Image (spheres, rainbow, N blue to C red):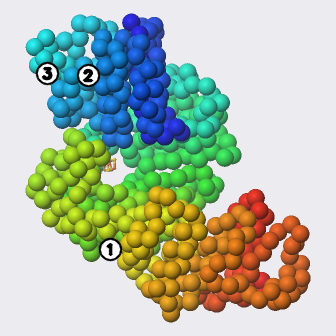
Amino acid sequence: MKVLLTTLNAKYIHLNLAIRLLYSLNKDRHQGLSFKEFTIKESPESIAQFCKDFDIVTFSCYIWNITPTMAVAKLLKEINPEIKILLGGPEVSYEYDDIINKPFIDYIIVGEGEIPMENFLNNYPDVSNVPNLVHKNANNEVVFIPQSVTFDLKNYAGINPYQFDDPAELKNKVGYIETSRGCPYKCEFCLASLDNKVRYLPIETIKSNLLYLINHGRVIKFLDRTFNVKRDFTIDMFSFILEHHKPGNIYQFEITADIVHPDIVKYIRENVPPGVFRFEIGIQTVNQKANLEVSRKQNFDKTAAVIKQLDDIIEMHLDLIVGLPLDEWEDIKFSFESVFALHPSELQLGFLKFLRGTPVRDKHEKYGYEFDPNPPYQIIKSDFLSAYQLEQIVLLEEALEVYWNKKRAIHTLKYVADKYSIFDFLHQLGVYFNSRYDFHHHTLFDVYDALNNFIIENYQEDINLQLLMTIDYQLNYKVKPQQRYLPEIDKSLKSELILNHKLDHHQYRFVIMECNDVCKSYFKNLEENKYLVVQYSGTDKPNYFGIN
Ligand code: SF4
């Protein structure tokens, strides 16, 4: 019996841990088992052609791949009506009736996959009594025997899910590793809230698999929902990583910042080199009423304090969710401005999604929510935000992505946040950009032309804004770009300064701007200098420094 474990990843660089784990657990008893990954960008036809000669094809399903997965499954059944199609994963584990009733779907595994998958493979084709397997009987009635089972993670002792991958390939991918399952919190919009028992894999296995990824991978992402639940475990893992760390590697963790133990902060400050760790922190909202309404615990003051203590060492990726119950326009503005003030490396503004199985989906009518019935089930409107307001925040989010997260106008936006409302600025900039350019197809010149014209139309008096924006433009090119926006100092003064300061004009190109005190305060080590020099090597990001 030939069985394929497969999935459609969102991007080529992603790896799917679930199919590797299921393969590792079952390969010895089932010689015909294999696994293979595709991406959602590949054509359903080519994926179906690859899969068509298996007896059973199992797909690992998530919110980002369910639509193309269903297209592949349908096509596959048309090509080979004898093939059996089994789905598993979070996207099919709840409210699965419409999916199992599709004629091209034969089976669904609900919940944690290890035990039902093993049962399924061991009993196939007589699987009618397999618990947690949804299927259709001879009368086409849906059959499901639920059973509350928890896979013992000790069974992963000695198993390296990446042992069958080409080690050389791991360098180009994100290496996912889980040390635990479950989350102690109960945020009602999140599927992890349904599994509150935190269970750990055997520590020796975690360490040997981590070591394997450290040696062969580059970006290593921990899948744990709250990595820092246990102080000793967290410090032990950080120490292990630093002991074996290879230059160039990056380690990403999802953490809950307000419970970071002071010993962890101290450990990081004393031991972790800058740029090696990245923390993803879900803030979601600063509005405590909204937090409570979705059973979410958070102390933003503590969160902000921890972020400030560590953000010179750790790259911070902060998340906000737009659309939570009780969060109105002004609340979202307040949350956004509070979080922006922390100057995270990345600020992601997500929109509330009504995931199958989550409590927030079950009680959506209570708050007048309307959401897209198709994945990703995103909010359309609620009692707290109109559809128009949500559309406006989408434009803000696009501007945030282009100008802040892509680091095109960092100094400009820091200044805006200090002097004006960054929420209003990015909202209006998003509206402006959207009416004249295309957020998904534009050039780098478009990015700066839009910002420059927007500033001139709306903030004509503010010379600092124009100056910072011009410097941000100059800092975003490896090769000295054509002069645009505010001019640099005049040519004869520039030649004199280059000569006086012995700047190497054979090796580098320079732009020299005169800076006032306000402008200087947004750049490091410029306090005593009158001029800011941008130095281009032509191959690397430009440097800047000050001269008089
Ligand atoms: S949002 Fe984060 S903290 Fe809340 S339940 Fe989900 S994983 Fe846990």
Q: Where does label 3 land, which residue?
A: 142
Q: CA distance from mark 2 to mark 1?
A: 48 Å
| 227 vs 365: above or below | above
Asked which quadrant contains residue 395, the reply is: bottom left
Q: Residues within 10 Å of mark 2 (few under 14, many from 20)?
A: many
| 315 vs 488: above or below | above
Which label lies toward us, 2 or 1? 2
Please name the amino acid that badge 1 sits on: Phe
Q: Contact (CB < 8 A) between labels 2 and 1?
A: no
Q: CA distance from mark 3 to mark 2?
A: 14 Å
Mark 1 lies on a secondary structure that is helix
Mark 2 lies on a secondary structure that is loop
Q: Where does label 2 land, which residue?
A: 104
* Residue drawn at x 45%, y 62% as measured from the top left: 439
Q: Where does label 1 land, which residue?
A: 334
Mark 3 lies on a secondary structure that is strand
Please name the amino acid that badge 2 sits on: Phe
Look at the numbered disc 2 and say if its residue's Cβ is closer than 8 Å to ligand 1. no
Which label lies toward us, 3 or 2? 2
